[in-house]
Amino acid sequence: QVQLVESGGGLVQPGGSLRLSCAASGRIVSVNSMGWYRQAPGKERELVASITSGGSTNLGDSVKDRFRISRDNSKNTVYLQMNRLEPVDTAVYYCNAYVINKDSASGYYWGQGTRVTVSS
């Protein structure tokens, strides 16, 4: 099967930075699009940023001037660099990827989530 494992969340003060990582592993042939979603308490899950295997990126309006998404295709890993964090960025961040796997079960996979708390 395929697993997505996130890391890098935590508590940070307003104005600070965090870097999230998400590594895909398992019976993988290739990883197409990868992205980050977040879900704040009482709100729906929303797209934060996405990146294609070719490196084209898409960022949400609320983060495009502060966050950057990148990936290392050799490691099937996607990163989210978050700068100038604000309390409204507090949420659980989920990694998402479209994976072509070896068991004919290709599709979107999700990580377990990593919590980001922005507070003084």
Image: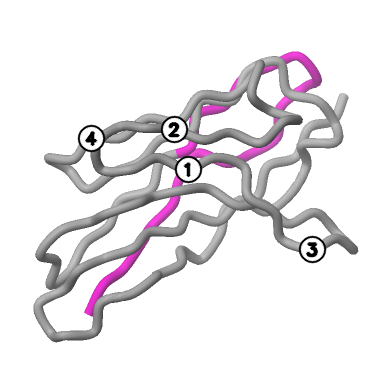
Q: Is residue 11 left or right of residue 80?
A: right
Q: Where residue 94 sits: x, y (%)? A: 55, 56
Say what amino acid the circle numbered 3 marks.
Glu
Q: Which mark is residue 57?
A: 2
Q: In the image shown, does 116 or 68 lie closer to the viewer?
A: 68
Q: Which mark is residue 50?
A: 1
Please name the residue that numbered disc 3 is placed on.
Answer: 44
Which numbered dot is residue 72? Answer: 4
| Mark 1 touches mark 3? (CB < 8 Å) | no
Q: How many marks?
A: 4
For the residues bearing labels 4 and 2, Cβ distance under 8 angstroms: no
Q: Which residues are magenta?
A: 1-20
Which label's residue is closer to the chain start, 4 or 1?
1
User: Left or right: 48 with respect to 80?
Assistant: right
Mark 1: amino acid: Ser
Element assignment for label 2: strand
Mark pair 1, 2: CA separation: 6 Å
Label 4 Cα crowd, 10 Å radius (few <14 / some 14-19 / many 20+) = few
